Structures are given as C-alpha cells and as structure tokens.
C-alpha cells in the first residue's frame, strides 16, 4: 500500500480522498493554489504545498508543478480526484514516468475509453448497448426504411445540411417515415440546396442512467449498479439517485453487467462510470465512459456499502478487488443534492464570499461531504459546488421525505444556494412519480 | 519513458551555464527556465480568512515584514539551491547588492534547474531558505532593501 | 397512524423524534421551557409551546402542563424521549387517561419491568440470565460452599454488617472460600460485632452489554442485537459500540433471544433495553430493563438498518412490527461518542454558554445527531450532552480509524468537550484490543 | 381512570365561584388554582440568543412594549377565557382599573379553570388574547399602566 499520496485537487473531493487515505493509514499531501490558502480541508492533510496562483491553469492544471510537489514531498502516488487533470491521459503518463502511481486507470485504458470510436467498438464487443445511427447521409428512401427498421422507431430524419429544426421530422412508423423523408428532402433542398438526409434513433423521453464500475489490475471488474442523473440543468447534474427508479430488474442486471464487461475488456483498473441514455421502453444507449471517480459516487456507496474511493486506492496499489459481483446488493435508496453556491432566483448566478451561516442537517441516513464551515470564503476561481448532501433511506418515498426534511434544516447564508430548487423539485410530481427525463428541470424553469 | 531516460547535466558539476534537458513531452526542453519573482503582498491573491496549520512546513517563520523591504518569492515549487554547484560559492549572500538581472538562486524541479533573478535592485538583507530546502509557490526566499 | 405527536423533551432527542415523525407524515408539537426559547430544534417542529421556566421540575417534569399543552395543540400522542418523564409509569397512565397515546410501553408493562423483584422473576421464566446471589446472610460454611458451587467461582464473601472493603474476601475455589469465610467472619465480628457474611457472584472484569429489543401490541418481540457500553465514567456512558467486540456468536444469539423473550412475556410494546454485565467467560447477568428509547440507539440503527424511533411510533399506533427476527442481521460496526459540554482537563466540569465554533465532521459512515449550531447558547439547566457522533464502518478497526478522523475534524469552541478524551481512549490498547471493562476509563483517569 | 370520571362543573353555566375538581392523582382537587403573574422582563430567564420562528402562533404581535407598562403574563399553559361564563360580561376590559386581587381572566387546562389575578394595580391598556384562545407559559395577556 502507498505511504504518501499527493492529492491534485481541492475542496470536497480533496477532503473525501484525505478521509479515505486516513483510514487506510496513508499520509496525504494536498497541493493548493493561493486562492485556496487556509482552505479547511488542508488542515486535514499531513502536508500541504502551494503550487501557484488562483487560476486553475496556473496551479491545479500545471502538471510540472504537481509533479515537483510530489517530488519534494516524497509522495508515491497521485490522486487526481475529478475535474482538473483527472481525465488527462498525458498527466497519467507523466505521473507514471516520473515514478508516481496514478490513482486511476493506465493512460492506455484511459485513452481507449476516452476515444469515442474505439470505445464504441469495444462496447459492441462487450455487449454494451450503444447509440445507433447512420454513419452518413442517405438518398434512397428504401434504404432509410431498412435502417429505421433495424434501429427501431421512433427515428428522426435530419437534413444533412440542416440546422435549427428545419428539415427535421420524427417518424414513429414506416408510413410516417416515408412521408417525413419526402417532406424533409423537399424542405432541405429548398432551404439548404441539399436534399441529403440521415436517420437516427430518436429518444422522445430519455433518462440519464449511469453504471458505476470498478476494475483491478488482475482482470476483475464489478459494477455497483446504477445512478439516475436525469435532474439536470444545462448538462449540469443537480440531483442524482440510486438505484434508478422503476427500472426492470432484468434489464438493470443486463446493462450493468455489460458495463462491467466493457471495462474488463479495457483492462481498466479503478473506478469508472458508463453513461447511458435510457428511453421510455428502457432501452439503453451508451453515451461515454468517465474514467475517474464521479461527483455522485457517494450514492452508490450508500446503496452498496462499498467505499469506492478506498477501493480505487487499493486497486491502484495492486490489490485485487476485495469483493465479487455476487457480493454486491442494492440496499435501500439514496439521493445526492449538489449544494451549489448559485442563486436559483437570479438565473443561477454564481455566489462567492464569506459563509456566515452553515447549519447542516443530521440524523439517520444523512451524509454531508463538504469542505465548508462558518468563516470559509468561497473563492471566485472554481466551480460553485460547496457541498454534497447524500440521503439514504429504505425506499425512494422515504428518501424523498427524508431529503425534504434535511434540505429544510440546511441553512446557508448570506450566499444563495440551490437548496430551494431541490425543495421544489422534490415536490414535483414528474420527479416523485419518476416520470421525469433529462429535460424536465429546464422545462420547469423556463418562463412560459 | 522512465526517469533514467533523462539527458541531464547536474549543474553542481559544471562551472558555467549548462544545458539541462529532459526528453519528455509535457515540458519543452529548456535552458534555465527563468521566472519573474513578484514583490511581497502582490503575488498572493489569497482570499481565505483563516490561516490554519495549512502553511507548508517549509515556510520561514523568521521573515520580518519590515517596512520598505521587498521579498523575492518563489515562482514555483521545487528545491532551493544557493549556488550553481556543490563546490561553488553562494550566488548571493547577506550584504550583496543585486539588480533586476542578478541570479539569486536556483530552483530545481523535475531535474530541471531554473535560475531565479532578483527582479529588483537593492541589498540582500536576509536569506530565508536553506540550501537544499524544498520551497512552495509564493514562499519568501530573500528580503531585499531597495536601492 | 397519529396525526400530531407532542414531544415532551428537548435537545437532540426532540430533534430525533421530529425527524422520525416528519418522515411518517406526522405533525409535531414541542413543549419547551423558557430556558430553551429559541432552541434550534423548535424551528423544526410544526408548533412549539412554552410550558414553564428553566428548571425541569417547573417545565419538563410538570405532567399537568404537558397534558394541557397536548390539549390546546390537539395532539393525539405524546413521545417522552429519554430521561425526564420517560420511565414514569404514572405519566404514561395520565397520558392514556387523558386520551393521548403514550409512545412507549403500557403503564403495566413499564411497572412490571421497572420492579426489580418482578422483573427478575419474569426474567427467570423467560430464560434471561440474571445475577445470582444469596438472599440473606449465612453462618454455616458448608452452606456457603454449596451456594458458591451453584453460582460458580469466583465469589465474593461480604460481611453483612460491613462496608468499606473490610470483611470482604474474593474466593476462586472452595479452599480459598473456606479460608476466606473464616477470615471474613473474624474480621467482621471484630469490626462490626456481627459475624454474619454472605456470598455473591463476583465479576472480576465485567463489561456492560445491553440488548436492544422492540415489541408490538400483537405479541411480537424482536431484538436488534447488542451494544457494549463499557466505556463509562461515574456510571455515565461515554463510548458505546455495536456489536460488542469479541463475543462468541452462539452466546450472543442466546442472550439476545432471551431478552426478546423477556419483553414478549411482559406484553411490552415499544423499544426497550435489557442491560447485562458480561464476565470474562462471557456469562451474562441482567442488571435491569430500560423501558424507553436509549441515548445510544443510533448505533443499533446503524448495524441493523432499522429505524428504532420510527418503529417505536408505529407500534404505539397499533401497527405490527414490520420485520421478523430472521430479517435482522449485523452489518459492520458502529460507535457512538457522546459530545458532552464538559472539560476533561478540569474534572469534567460542565460547560455552558455560547457556541462560537461548531465545525462538524462528515463523509462516509458519519452521522451526527445534535441540536447545536453556531450561535446556540448551551443552557445551564440541563445535562451536558450537546450531540452524538455516530460512526459506522465495515469492521471495528476501520470504525476506530474513521472515528479518530471524525473526532479530529470536530471543532467546538470556546466551550470544552469530551472529544479529546475519546481521542485518547481510541488509542488505548485496552480499548482497541477489546480488553476493556466498565472500570477501565476511571482507572486511566485516576491520578497515580 | 377515564376522562368521564371527572366531576366537573362548567363555569360558564354558573353565576358564581364554582368548585371544579378532578378525581385524579397528579393534580390535587382544587378550587381555582390561582397563580401569581409576574411583570414583563422578569419572568422569563431565557438564555437563547436567537428568536427564530419558535414562537407559539398564539403569541400576540401587537404588544407594544411601551415604557412604563406592565404585562400580565400567563403562568401556565391553557385556554384563555375573558369571562366566568359564556353569557357573562368580561371580567376586565380596556380602561378597567385593577388591583392585585382583581381576577382578570380564567385559564383552563385539563378541565380545571384557574383564576388569574392582576398582581399589580393600574389600568388595563390592552387585552392581548382573544376569548377561547390557547396560551403558553409566559405569554403576555394584558398590558397594565401602573397606578
């Protein structure tokens, strides 16, 4: 096992990694920017080293400064957290070449899964469902009908030269497809001078479904079931939950197993997340693989009892996964709420400044991952997430009630946070009845 | 790429400016990457309110912020060397006069030695860091009384 | 289910009950003394009613004021919490007679288990191990030897008229017993003028072992395994853990089952705790039954996943227990640390006053039950416990490491707390190796 | 013991002082348990710093703490009655003169009616609670301008 791990990150995830290392008996070195001087998480590290000024490009993204800090502090491994350099295969390579274990996948596995084409090819081999679509335009209607039949209705007909919704037609059967292509070609020819159209799988109501997986250096890979992250605004996840509500158990098992198989074939050691869209019929289409620990990992920890961060460190140090797939069971329901320093009433304007009130919820099933305390000043340099509230309960309904209670207890001031938004969403029937999709938050928030 | 692939000339074995290069892709081969140091009080836009025990242990306790003195701060993370070689005299000592271009020390990181210039004119009043000591970004290295 | 529950308590347990009710869709009425005006937990209640001045005898112990508050607020049940009136059978009776359900056992069951003689008789019938001892003095040595043979060595010979250690002898076998009785009688006769001695079971190194049980009004009773509360000072529990470390699984099952059988025979509905002493050979001797929810209930919640407070409310409302004994499994290890506003460096002098610093730990496995926040003023009127830190981990060793980390993160000021004591105890080999007993804390703290 | 075991005379049906007793063991049978009210600012030894929304909803918002006025506060939890019966006039109204022994209202709790005396001399300036309203301990009932 490692003796000293350098943490190339900040805030709550730095604190999360410090806590994991502490329990494994590992010393920690935190690098920090001068904007983070005095950050509460630094007190919890064995050592901390300032590596540059506030802007990330001059500190948290400066590979040579991080490596220099690892050298002078005699670290033997580097944990990238999420964001910053965590999915930078070059950084992973430099760490390895400089004699520091990168806590994450090998640069090769990271590059393989980071490349859309290669990743899709491997996914096909592994049986991981991928997003079907034509690889180019089509001119022949019969060919389009054949492809649509293969990928399944509904499909969308898009003009190759198009944009802005013009030349687009959604087709739910062959008849409407033939009509749609005819209309789309005419419209496209008139509008763009190019009658070429193509056909893609169309998801009318998709949910974001992602599978937590973890592999080791001995050829093992296990999934920790999935998370539903459909509550998004501008592709930023707001509420995550595990497991995804209302999913057919057999379909769940199959797609989760396929995600584990994918990272096994990639010789992937560490935690990763396979992101899918799920349509209303519970078909899955892989979007991408995130080759790092995810912000929302704690809800998977809650329902499986597996410490994902500690396990990631163990496998990086060469240990085999300490559990098998058959040991993993879903226990209850968990939700995570990202406490962002943003004002929902003013178009989510980021908030920075002194935290004067920070009164946090507690009791059974309440976990808080945050580096904030009264007197902390939220810097302007980094993202607005100042904490994560994780709520675990025996079932989804209790989890929602518990979450409403906890959010009601959570007082932050004077800066505004996303807490009031979550209190609203948790009372929204689309969400409580799990009829939500990835667009429901934006629809709710749009003035209209 | 392994560490031993480095083409390296240890400065401490040479008399004059040496070419130190590393065959890697993330830092271009360079000759004494030189960085400008900035005066005290302007370099760190620290906004944190509580200064806990998060200070690096390498930070000097003895730096008196006497009015009128200028600090030369470390522009990088690395190891501090007072001389260009083990058998060489210190580049500057207390009492030495420096100007903007005077090389006051070397900072080594990832086998690359970086010359640090004074970037101000005056007299060295204090050397705050010991030879071979690790320094972090923004750490005060020298106190200068401006000319 | 109840519509409105009046909570006849304060502080963290009032907040715990509010949280439980909230998740069950029950409104809450908190009564409070004027010393608790503005207490943060009151904000979480549906309604709060001041019932009297600070001293408990004029407020939290005033039955008629609590009943009057229940009347004017249209409560349908009253939760007593722990302490105050919680084990007062008369209060339970008045609640019932005034038309309010008492959330706890019937007055009859409470009285039965509260009476030492009746409780011991019922325990004998239920197969619950009780503390053996002679019922009076003996003069005949052979009779003493016979009794000692029955209760098992070691035994202690005590002078009937004695005290202060004089006339006492511990005997490990018949020979030393005969000699000891001889010596004790001579010494007792000389010292007190009364040669009468008696023989009792002697526990050289006892641990406090208590079984969490819960029953309903339909004749069901289930145990939730045990807690070890051996870390005590002046009979005040400091650290509790579950399960008790190093206990033989078969012996655990047997004593826990006997505790459930005891409360089933008492027709007991609600949560109770059967307290035992456990000797070095893991024999158990029941001390008493606590007929209420216990301060340390959260560690049993942690290892079993059962919400004890919610279950107590459900059974009081007439529901059957929603689980069977076979559903209860031990999952991991949990510890509770009572954060007391006392100064360990100054003989645990109670601390009162304004909380200026309250920076709490978080992350996986950390639960905090506390009514405190920055700006809260600890009143002088009540007990010194200002919070409970509950730590859950996969095993005891990890739990200790996690606890040390969490205690290190926990900053309270300017008042002193028992946190530094726990940091010391968690590094104490007697504790970490589970070689502790109920006297080890006092031995460690005694100057010498 | 059930609620109906009470031997009770509803005050509102009688002209004069009535005996109200309850056959229970936790509150001795009593004739108008009378409690002394205490002046504002002395009764509540509140040490809590923040007055949140924990105020009982019954508390009046309209009480002006004008200098020189004395508040008669509720010494118990119960229901406030201005008169000794539904067809009786209010015991006191704004403008009434009271002295220490003047009964200003009745407070009912657990079927027992308690006479509340003014415990001071002066003129009733405000009645802060409505007939039939629930009051908590320490709640202001009347404002009195001392004689």
Image (spheres, coloured by chain):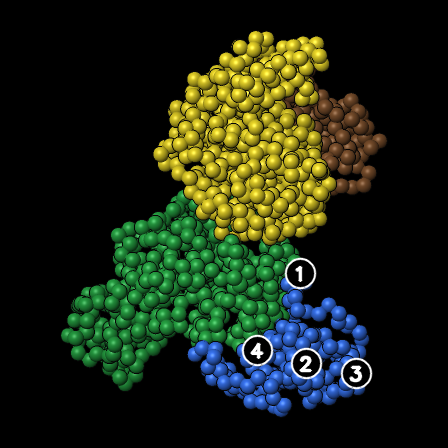
Chain colours: A green, B blue, C yellow, D brown
Q: Quadrant of residue B59?
A: bottom right
Q: Label 2, label 4: how many angstroms apart (C-alpha)?
A: 15 Å
Dot 4 corresponds to which residue? Answer: B109
Q: Residue at x 46, y 46 (%)?
A: C395
Q: Residue at x 50, y 24 (%)?
A: C285
Do marks 4 and 3 share a chain?
A: yes
Label annotation for residue B95: 3
Dot 1 corresponds to which residue? Answer: B52
Q: Earlier in the sequence, mark 3 or mark 2?
A: 2
Percent x, y for residue B127?
Answer: 73, 77
Q: Label 1, label 4: how many angstroms apart (C-alpha)?
A: 27 Å
Q: Along the horizontal axis of the image, is A221 left or right of A80? A: left
- Residue A345 shows in the view: no
Q: Secondary structure at mark 4?
A: strand
Image marks 3 and 1: residues in contact by CB distance under 8 Å? no
Q: Quadrant of residue D5?
A: top right
Dot 2 corresponds to which residue? Answer: B82
Question: Who is closer to the viewer here, C339 or D116?
Answer: C339
Image marks 2 and 4: residues in contact by CB distance under 8 Å? no
Image marks 1 and 2: residues in contact by CB distance under 8 Å? no
Question: Who is closer to the viewer here, D134 or D2?
Answer: D2
Label annotation for residue C231: none
């Amino acid at each position: 096992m490692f003796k000293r791990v350098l943490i190339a990150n900040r805030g709550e995830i730095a604190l999360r990694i410090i806590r994991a290392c502490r329990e494994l008996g590992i010393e920690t070195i935190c690098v920090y920017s001068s904007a983070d001087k005095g950050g509460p998480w630094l007190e919890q590290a064995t050592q901390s080293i300032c590596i540059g000024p506030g802007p990330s490009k001059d500190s948290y993204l400066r590979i040579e400064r991080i490596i220099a800090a690892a050298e002078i502090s005699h670290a033997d491994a580097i944990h990238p957290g999420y964001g910053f350099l965590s999915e930078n295969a070059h950084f992973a390579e430099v760490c390895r070449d400089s004699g520091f274990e990168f806590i994450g996948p090998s640069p090769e596995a990271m590059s393989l899964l980071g490349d859309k084409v290669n990743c899709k090819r491997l996914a096909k081999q592994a049986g991981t469902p991928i997003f079907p679509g034509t690889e180019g335009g089509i001119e022949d209607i019969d060919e389009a009908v054949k492809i649509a039949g293969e990928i399944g209705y509904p499909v969308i007909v898009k003009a190759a030269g198009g944009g802005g919704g013009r030349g687009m037609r959604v087709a739910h059967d062959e008849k409407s497809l033939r009509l749609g292509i005819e209309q789309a070609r005419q419209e496209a020819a008139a509008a763009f001078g190019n009658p070429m159209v193509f056909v893609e799988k169309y998801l009318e109501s998709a949910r974001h479904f992602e599978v937590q997986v973890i592999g080791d250096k001995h050829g093992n890979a296990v999934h920790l079931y999935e998370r539903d992250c459909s509550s998004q605004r501008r592709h930023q996840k707001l509420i995550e939950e595990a497991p995804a509500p209302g999913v057919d158990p057999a379909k769940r098992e199959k797609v989760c197993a396929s995600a584990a198989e994918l990272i096994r074939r990639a010789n992937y050691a560490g935690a990763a997340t396979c992101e899918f869209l799920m349509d209303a019929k519970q078909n899955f289409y892989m979007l991408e693989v995130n080759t790092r620990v995810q912000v929302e990992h704690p809800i998977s920890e809650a329902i499986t009892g597996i410490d994902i961060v500690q396990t990631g460190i163990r496998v990086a140090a060469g240990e085999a996964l300490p559990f098998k797939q058959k040991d993993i069971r879903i226990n209850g329901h968990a939700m995570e709420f990202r406490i962002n320093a943003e004002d929902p009433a003013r178009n989510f304007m980021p908030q920075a400044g002194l935290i004067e009130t920070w009164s946090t919820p507690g009791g059974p099933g309440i976990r808080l991952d945050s580096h904030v305390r009264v007197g902390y000043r939220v810097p302007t340099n980094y993202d607005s997430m100042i904490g994560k509230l994780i709520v675990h309960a025996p079932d989804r309904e209790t989890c929602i009630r518990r979450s409403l209670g906890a959010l009601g207890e959570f007082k932050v001031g004077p800066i505004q946070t996303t807490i009031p938004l979550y209190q609203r969403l948790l009372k929204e029937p689309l969400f409580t009845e799990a009829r939500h999709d990835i667009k429901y938050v934006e629809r709710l928030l749009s003035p209209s | 790429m392994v560490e031993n692939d480095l083409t390296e000339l240890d400065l401490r074995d040479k008399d004059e400016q040496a070419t130190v290069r590393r065959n890697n892709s993330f830092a271009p081969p360079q000759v004494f990457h030189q960085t400008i140091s900035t005066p005290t009080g302007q370099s760190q836009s620290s906004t944190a309110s509580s200064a806990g025990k998060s200070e690096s242990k390498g930070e000097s306790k003895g730096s008196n912020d006497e009015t009128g003195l200028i600090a030369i701060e470390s522009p990088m993370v690395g190891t501090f060397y007072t001389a260009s070689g083990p058998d060489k005299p210190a580049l500057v000592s207390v009492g030495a006069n420096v100007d903007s271009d005077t090389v006051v020390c070397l900072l080594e990181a990832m086998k690359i030695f970086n010359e640090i210039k004074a970037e101000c004119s005056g007299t060295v009043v204090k050397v705050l860091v010991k030879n071979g000591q690790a320094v972090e970004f923004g750490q005060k290295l020298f106190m200068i009384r401006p000319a």
